[in-house]
Image: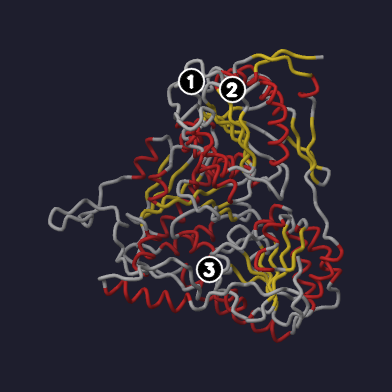
Amino acid sequence: MTVRLTVAQALVRFLAAQYSERDGIEQRLIPGCFGIFGHGNVAGVAQALLETAESGDLPYHLARNEQGMVHAAVGYSRMRNRLQAMACTASIGPGSTNMLTGAALATTNRIPVLLLPSDIFATRVASPVLQELEQPSGYDVSVNDAFRPLSRFFDRVWRPEQLPSALLGAMRVLTDPAETGAATIALPQDVQAEAHDWPDELFAKRVWHIPRPVPEPAALARAAAIISSARRPLLVAGGGVHYSEAGDALRRFAEATGIPVADTQAGKGALLWDHPQAVGGVGSTGSPVANALAREADVVIGVGTRYSDFTTASRTAFQNPDVRFVNVNIAAFDAAKHAGSTLVADARAALDALVDAVEGYRVDDAYTAAHRAHTREWNQVVDQAVHLGHAPLPAQTEVLGALNEEMDTRDVVVQAAGSMPGDLQMLWRARDAKQYHVEYAYSCMGYEIAGALGVKMAAPDREVFALVGDGSYLMMSQELVTAVSEGIKLNVVIVENRGFASIGALSESLGSQRFGTAYRYRNPETGQLDGDVLPVDLAANAASLGADVIRVRTIEEFRAALARSRASDRTTAIHIETDPLAPVPSSESWWDVPVSEVAQLMSTNQARKTYEAHKAEQRPLLRPSGAPGSEEGSP
């Protein structure tokens, strides 16, 4: 039997029938669709969504910015541990290319999203159409080809007959934990509205089973042998621990072996902050405790981490000349990094297997006592930083500390860019596996409010706090309107420091004297942007977008405002100004940002000397990870 539908109608009906399953729990794979309609999709996907509006088969959410809606989809999927993926539809040309940044963010973070950019006419009957990019080298090229390197799957449906294979290919990638990321199906606007006779089975309920690959026995034995030989091991927990719901397995492994556990930005909360084996973030913005352990570690066990430059301190974190890596990852691409002993498997399955495989192994009591003593010292530094009493404006660390202390265990903080991710990884005390949501693979300014919208949609029973700096707020705050229109309550904390605090501090450290990093009038005397501060009122802007606004100046007022915001059922923004020059504790680590090799400025020349000293500590991390004294490779 067949049913006659347009391509867009068939697309919507197919998506509504897709389900995912893991550990016996079944749920809708595509629970909804974000979209902004234009001439490219208003007669196609929009019409199809209208026909299903009453049934609720594929709920539609009107976004205000195409990049923002992809960020919201990422926030949603990450909160659901990648078991669900939202769809995003946009019109031809700029509407679709606005999603490119979101596609890059999703794929970099290994988060599934389904992107449905509209495209030029397949028939070319009216070419060049409005917003079409003409390429003399080929008429089949459109702006949507820019999605190809940013997507884990890309296809363009030139004919209705191509839709089923494109849809199945996209679903495969969305549900493959090793290959996931943005899946993009470009839809020519004339094809969207074209009718076709579809087989009924295309729209039958289809369940995509999310696998938990178990470790290959020989690889498990190699990994166990290396771990059992370690005297100063360190485990680095990445986002894969969360996505595989391996927190309990990680805790059992840490308690059985005594191995200390550091975390990445995506992995924070994998082991709660007050667990005896937890040593905080590792790398450029990590804790001195974890970084001291990393420098001396003879075995590093990476679980679900992609080893970004911040995690490895640009490959200066691991200084032991004999350091070996055991990499547990569902993706072979990440498992093979740093010439590690690869254990390609689901994180939970691998950790459960490792507990048995290393039975009887435990680190020395002296090793444990040393890092616990260092942790106690560091906790005192953190307490000091978050209760600094800085004046006349509070320090950013005090704002973060107050928020951390006032939030309930199940509340979620959402952040992404600027100086706050570094301060958060260093200072935040995660009391729940899902409390800490910082996007730091792409570190995309503007993710905060849009991402928080997706988080709240995925977890309506949790209070969600979007923590956004003035720079990020100015880049993308439009999804406040979406939250208001949908009745989705967000708590938004706007931290104003009148410029780019993170890049300002980085600029100064590189000898560039904070050039171009402050929001100022152009000074007619100097010709530079170093005049008076601009009269920008972000709180008034938030109010104009429909949010309730609370302005505060002190930490005491901030704490009271948090309580008011929590008690409200409306989206509320709290505005507080901080001192961008207030002190922050040192991570005792480094990040590789090149400094000009020649310069007229003394500050730059001095920064170059410091840079070269750090560069000398970088390591290739290519030593084979066989048994002690062996040169055997492990992949």
Q: In this view, does 186 lie above or below 405?
A: above
Q: Residue 45 carries which label?
A: 2
Q: Quadrant of the N terminus?
A: top right
Q: Nearer the viewer, residue 127 or 389?
A: 127
**Which residue is painted at 42% across and 67% down in the image?**
594
399 lies left or right of 9: left
Is residue 390 in view from this perspective? no
Q: How far apart are marks 1 and 3 (CA)?
A: 46 Å
Marks 2/1 in contact by CB < 8 Å: the verdict is no
387 lies left or right of 169: left
Q: Distance between the residues labelled 3 and 2?
A: 45 Å
Label 2 packing within 10 angstroms: few (<14), some (14-19), many (20+): many
Q: Residue 314 carries which label?
A: 3
- Which amino acid is tagged 1? His
Q: Which of marks 1 and 3 is nearer the N terminus?
A: 1
- Which amino acid is tagged 2? Val
Q: Which of marks 3 and 2 is nearer the N terminus?
A: 2
Q: Residue 185 carries which label?
A: none
Is residue 330 in view from this perspective? yes
- Provide residue 64's location: percent of width, then percent of height: 47, 33
Q: Which of marks 3 and 2 is in front?
A: 3
Label 1 packing within 10 angstroms: few (<14), some (14-19), many (20+): few
- SS label for mark 3: loop
Q: Name the residue under label 1.
A: 39
**Which residue is painted at 22% across and 57% down in the image?**
530
